[in-house]
Image (cartoon, helix red, strand yellow):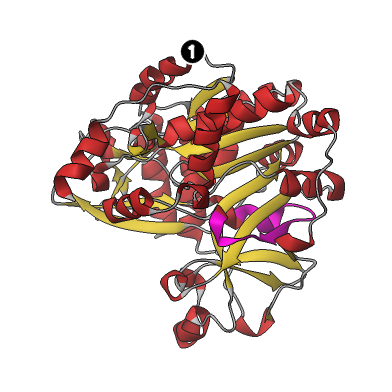
Amino acid sequence: MADEKLPKLREAVAGLGQISDKEKSGFISLVSRYLSGDEEHIEWAKIHTPTDEVVVPYDTLESPPEDLEATKALLNKLAVLKLNGGLGTTMGCTGPKSVIEVRNGFTFLDLIVIQIESLNKKYGSNVPLLLMNSFNTHDDTLKIVEKYSNSSIEIHTFNQSQYPRVVADEFLPWPSKGKTDKDGWYPPGHGDIFPSLMNSGKLDLLLSQGKEYVFIANSDNLGAIVDMKILNHLIHKQNEYCMEVTPKTLADVKGGTLISYEGRVQLLEIAQVPDAHVDEFKSIEKFKIFNTNNLWVNLKAIKRLVEADALKMEIIPNPKEVDGVKVLQLETAAGAAIRFFDHAIGMNVPRSRFLPVKATSDLQLVQLEQIHQIPQLSWALSSRRLGVSLVASSQFLALLSSIA
């Protein structure tokens, strides 16, 4: 069956003029792996709980250097990348989610810019900000970042891949069937960050600037600020990949966790768990930590693995029905890449580094929370003393007031 589907799909994809040859190649490779059925299946008996050497407790980290020049040298090896492909539709916003106001007139993006700009101002460093957009958020984001044109921070944007949705019953790309608007396409998950960083030219740019690590996080995580203790640890231990994890609560039982498997650290998602062990997976006694999606990754390692086409993360099939048509999206997650990197570790961090705002109800809680308990807001207010100022609209706070 796979032998019959793939040639027709490949021929149809070749005729799609809206995407690049690299995107076409990446899509066909993903579909080929999916059709082959060669995905690795977890053998439950081989799963082991990671030791503290594999998942390092945050409170065991050494303090970073207090010397300003030493701190500057560390920061100059870092770039920050925020995942900016999502729309704010679930929170009443038609544009990128990162432009929703959070509190005190600041949007998610304002808070991100303020924190990095404050670091650069304090230490004289040059930590750039990268925004990985999707085709859904790209145009709006280009307009929005113009407000930071007078900022001292270097901001880069690039798009993740654009793949065609596949019509389920024919297994052909929907755009080739006439669905050429945005609904015919999808962004293939944040696992696409690695080839997209490479294909955009941004990876080589960062390497040419002497950057060694990129800190990746969701734009809606108010706890995901640059942490000098983590950066200092990774640079000195030469870990190619670090995933921040934090203790599970009953609200997090479906979140992916880290395991030791056949000598390597690996992300285990609930979709990979045999039915007989799902309740065990959800237990906060055995699997005590979960993935925050705060990731620190070595740039040279990304280049090495992308060039070798070695990042074969688990495929996440995502069937949908759009305009009455059943379609299939194939996606990957950035956290699943951990097993391909050398000296990869987890970092068991405080819960304060995981403060996602996924719904209006989360935003209402942020409105009520003490400022000092929200890292990005705390930075924003203290940054005023450093002379950092941004203008943000009050539209979303007005909306929030109207529904509270």
Which residue is the extreme one toward the front? 385
> In terms of secondary structure, where does tag 1 sit?
loop
Quadrant assignment for the N terminus:
bottom left
Which residue is the extreme one toward the bottom? 276
Q: Position of residue 313 (x, y in %)?
A: 57, 55
Which residue is the extreme one toward the top? 150
Q: Position of residue 366 (x, y in %)?
A: 38, 50
Q: Position of residue 294 (x, y in %)?
A: 58, 50
- Residue 177 at least partly seen: no
Q: Residue at x 81, y 30 (%)?
A: 68
Dot 1 crowding, Cα within 10 Å, few <14, some 14–19, many 20+: few
Callout count = 1
Tell me where the magenta segment starts and ends, as one range.
337-352
The residue closer to the viewer here, 252 or 331, is 252
Q: Position of residue 154 (x, y in %)?
A: 59, 19
The residue closer to the viewer here, 121 or 131, is 121
Q: Given the image, on which type of amino acid does mark 1 rest?
A: Ser
Pointer 1: what residue?
A: 149
Q: Quadrant of residue 286?
A: bottom right
Left or right: 389 with respect to 203?
Answer: left
Residue 347 forms part of the magenta stretch: yes
Left or right: 166 with respect to 326?
Answer: right
Residue 340 forms part of the magenta stretch: yes
Q: Residue at x 55, y 61 (%)?
A: 351
- Residue 118 at least partly seen: yes
